[in-house]
């Protein structure tokens, strides 16, 4: 989640059951958000334990939630209803493969296979602010009033997995493990990361800042975000990072080649955009298409700001947005809520390596500096090359008072390696479909219904 958070502290291993307020105390966003996370963890775990990893309530007069039917060679229908995937409630109003609300499918890349294929559901949660959902903003506070809360939205996407002709047909009992083997295993072993601060050999202390022994030398508390930009293995994968958790995002009015017109240039110099900044252009379609189960899936390029027109709120980039096939239409459709998001690895003075249009090359087994003493390390694996999924991220709180980052450590004080903090994807098999001569087809329903009521 790219929110403007102080930190994200929920950890199920701590076994906290609630967050309790105390009188006369300071209230923080992290405490309120942890209470929400505790409740969601409890409810979803309960639903998963009772219903299983994926189940739907059957309808006596219909297919029930997410039932597949109506295949004609080009599309199929998805029945309305509900399904619980790892305890997450998914709701469908009824659609077809091409018109699913969060699909944003590519007519060339996402054509249905000519041979047999598995239809499955991919579920994840998307972070949404008032920039993507304007109704969140309270208009009584003014037409350009203050930003308040944000939301998370459950995204479900109906996907297809091509199968070899004559391959074994999964049934209701084996479909879940079959799906994990053919989809989930593509990203194993997962990428892991460790974070620390490096103590400088020589540092000049300041009465207004951290002392000479400080590892983190930044002037403000930050929540660093390290995110995989281009997926794949070492040598292919790249990353990007932000000191503001990637929360500096500005609404786009329009795009003309390399010129992007913005609603605003930001609240101030710290939360705005300037010459030399690295940015990306995204919208609802780009975000939803970014969730892919194909490790070699392409990604959009990053741009460097070349010029800023403060009077007309325009920025000129080092490349034309229309030339990027992944972002070609970004900014052209206001209904998709286009945004310009700033990343900080292009900031002046960073010594972490060459900044490329595809991000910073990801190197394993060495400490890579971000800024102000903060370093990260992508750990190699003994079980084969690690696979980094586009969009995977880690969050690293840095604090001025301690001069350090908040990261788990082992008994000897060494930083521990951790799997990504997100995005978490969940899967559920829906159907096996095999085209036959003409409009005929064979369909096997792989959904698991609720246990019968007694």
Image (cartoon, helix red, strand yellow):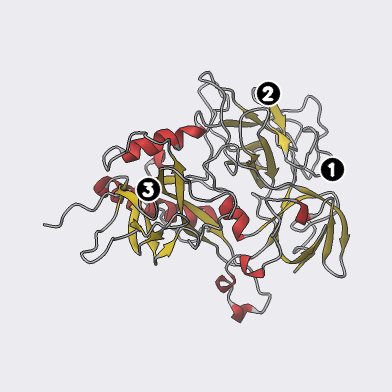
What SS does tag 2 mark?
Answer: loop
> In the picture, residue 365 is in which quadrant?
top right
Residue 260: image location, x then y, percent: 79, 62
Alpha carbon separation for disc pair 2 and 1: 22 Å
Alpha carbon separation for disc pair 1 and 3: 60 Å
Q: How many marks?
A: 3
What SS does tag 3 mark?
Answer: loop
Q: Nearer the viewer, residue 266 or 117?
A: 117
Classify residue 227 as left or right of residue 85.
Answer: right
Name the disc covering residue 436, or none: 3
Name the disc covering residue 365, or none: none
Sequence-wise first label, 2 or 1: 1
Classify residue 105 as left or right of residue 377.
Answer: left
Residue reaching furthest to the left: 454
Residue under the image location 55 percent in, 55 percent down: 105
Classify residue 384 as left or right of residue 334.
Answer: left
What SS does tag 1 mark?
Answer: loop
Name the disc covering residue 366, or none: 2
Q: Are marks 3 and 2 in contact (CB under 8 Å)?
A: no
Residue reaching furthest to the top: 382
Residue 447: image location, x then y, percent: 30, 49
Question: Split into 4 quadrants, where in the image is the C terminus?
Answer: bottom left
Give the class, few, some or many, for how many residues have Cα within 10 Å of label 1's Cα (few <14, many ≥20). few
Sequence-wise first label, 3 or 2: 2
Q: Nearer the viewer, residue 165 or 222?
A: 165
Residue 43: image location, x then y, percent: 33, 53
Q: Are marks 1 and 3 in contact (CB under 8 Å)?
A: no
327 is higher (above) or lower (below) than 352 = below
Residue under the image location 43 percent in, 54 percent down: 35
Sequence-wise first label, 1 or 3: 1
């Amino acid at each position: 989640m790219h929110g403007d958070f102080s930190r994200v502290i929920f950890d199920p291993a701590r076994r906290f059951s609630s967050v309790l307020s105390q009188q006369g105390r300071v209230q923080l966003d992290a405490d309120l958000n942890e209470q929400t996370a505790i409740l969601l963890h409890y409810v979803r775990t309960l639903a998963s334990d009772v219903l299983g990893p994926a189940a739907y309530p059957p309808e006596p007069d219909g297919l029930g939630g997410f039932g597949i039917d109506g295949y004609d060679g080009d599309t199929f229908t998805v029945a309305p209803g509900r399904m619980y995937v790892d305890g997450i409630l998914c709701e469908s109003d009824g659609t077809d493969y091409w018109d699913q609300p969060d699909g944003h499918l590519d007519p060339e890349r996402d054509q249905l296979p000519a041979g047999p294929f598995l239809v499955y559901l991919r579920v994840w949660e998307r972070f949404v602010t008032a920039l993507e959902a304007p109704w969140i903003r309270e208009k009584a506070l003014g037409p350009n009033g203050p930003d308040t809360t944000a939301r998370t939205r459950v995204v479900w996407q109906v996907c297809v997995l091509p199968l070899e002709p004559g391959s074994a047909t999964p049934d209701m009992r084996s479909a879940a493990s079959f799906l994990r083997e053919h989809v989930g295993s593509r990203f194993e072993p997962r990428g892991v990361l460790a974070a620390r601060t490096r103590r400088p050999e020589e540092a000049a202390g300041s009465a207004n800042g951290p002392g000479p022994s400080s590892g983190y030398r930044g002037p403000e508390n930050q929540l660093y975000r390290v995110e995989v930009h281009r997926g794949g293995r070492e040598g292919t994968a790249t990353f990007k990072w932000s000191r503001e958790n990637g929360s500096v995002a500005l609404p786009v009015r329009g795009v003309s080649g390399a010129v992007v017109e913005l609603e605003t240039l930001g609240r101030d110099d710290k939360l705005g955009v300037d010459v030399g900044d690295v940015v990306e252009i995204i919208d609802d379609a780009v975000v939803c298409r970014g969730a892919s189960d194909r490790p070699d899936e392409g990604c959009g390029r990053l741009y460097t700001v070349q010029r800023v027109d403060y009077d007309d709120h325009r920025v000129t980039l080092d490349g034309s947005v229309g030339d990027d096939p992944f972002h070609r239409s970004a900014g052209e459709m206001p209904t998709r809520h286009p945004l310009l998001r700033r990343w900080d690895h292009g900031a002046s003075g960073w010594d972490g390596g060459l900044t490329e249009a595809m991000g910073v090359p990801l190197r394993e087994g060495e400490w890579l500096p971000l800024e102000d003493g903060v370093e990260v390390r992508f750990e190699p694996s003994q079980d084969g090359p690690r696979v980094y999924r586009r969009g995977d991220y880690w969050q690293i709180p840095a604090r001025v008072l301690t001069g350090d980052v908040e990261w788990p450590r082992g008994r000897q004080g060494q930083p521990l390696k951790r799997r990504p903090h997100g995005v978490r994807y969940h899967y559920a098999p829906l159907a096996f479909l095999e085209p036959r001569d003409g409009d005929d087809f064979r369909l096997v329903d792989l959904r698991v219904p609720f246990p019968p009521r007694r």
